[in-house]
Amino acid sequence: MSKAFTRETDNDDEEEISPGLQLPQGVKNYISPAGHARLKAELDHLLRVERPHVVEVVAWAASNGDRSENGDYIYGKRRLREIDRRIRFLTKRLDIAEVVDPLRQPNRDQVFFGATVTICDLDGTENTYTIVGVDETDLGRGHISWVSPLARALIKAKEGDSVRFQSPAGLREIDIVAVEYKAIEGA
């Protein structure tokens, strides 16, 4: 059957665009001010720069005649679908976003969204993590999602507490060395 007669579905936008960044059903999309600004900037760039450029290329390619072997047309249409899918995804994420500024956290001795937490493993290894939104996760920078097992175990704990959680490597116990709230820088 020709691809022209198959239907593309866009009901699985989140899995196609960003696997592993799914929110639990019915929860808010907590995000830092910097993360919110980054998503808005990406959406704005796609709408004002990227999409109009690709539409222009596709229109030019379509005017050249035979579309069946026209690479600019075929790849332009494919890129346009990818852009539109990403625009839908970003729009949905921004619609349910709840911006949480860690600098405005009144209860600074407990771990909540936006906290930068220094932990110590039983072997003495210290690591520092910042609890951020699912769209801001970057393990290389120490930014972990608030829905991750580690972050969920840390939530509401205080400096000096020991916390146990189920990691992919098995049950782990960690000590909370420090809790602080500072501005989360954008990527």
Image (cartoon, rainbow, N blue to C red):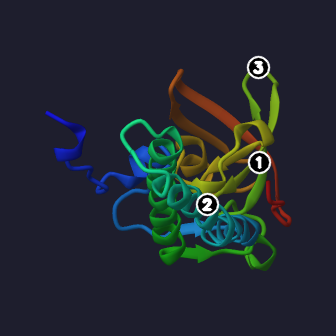
Name the residue rendered at 39%, 45% in the picture: 66
Distance of mark 1 from mark 2, alpha carbons?
12 Å
Residue where numbered disc 3 is placed: 123
**Residue nearest the viewer, comparing 85 with 169:** 85
What's under tag 3, amino acid-wise?
Asp
Q: Nearer the viewer, mark 1 or mark 2?
A: 2
Q: Quadrant of residue 11?
A: bottom left
Distance of mark 3 from mark 1, alpha carbons?
16 Å
Sort mark 2 into few (<14), some (14-19) or many (20+) by Cα contacts within 10 Å: few
Query: In the structure shown, which secondary structural element does the residue marked by tag 2 occupy?
Result: loop
Where residue 102 appears, as percent x and y from the top left, is 76, 70
Q: Is residue 130 above or below residue 3?
A: below
What's under tag 1, amino acid-wise?
Gly
Residue where numbered disc 2 is placed: 156
Name the residue rendered at 80%, 35% in the picture: 127
Quarter of the rendering occupied by the N terminus: top left
Where residue 124 appears, as percent x and y from the top left, is 82, 24
Q: Quadrant of residue 183?
A: bottom right
First in sequence: mark 2 vs mark 3: 3
Q: Is residue 74 above or below residue 123?
A: below
Where residue 114 appears, as percent x and y from the top left, is 72, 63
Sort mark 1 into few (<14), some (14-19) or many (20+) by Cα contacts within 10 Å: few
What's under tag 2, amino acid-wise?
Lys
Residue where numbered disc 1 is placed: 160
Is residue 127 shown left or right of residue 174?
Answer: right
Name the residue rendered at 78%, 69% in the picture: 108
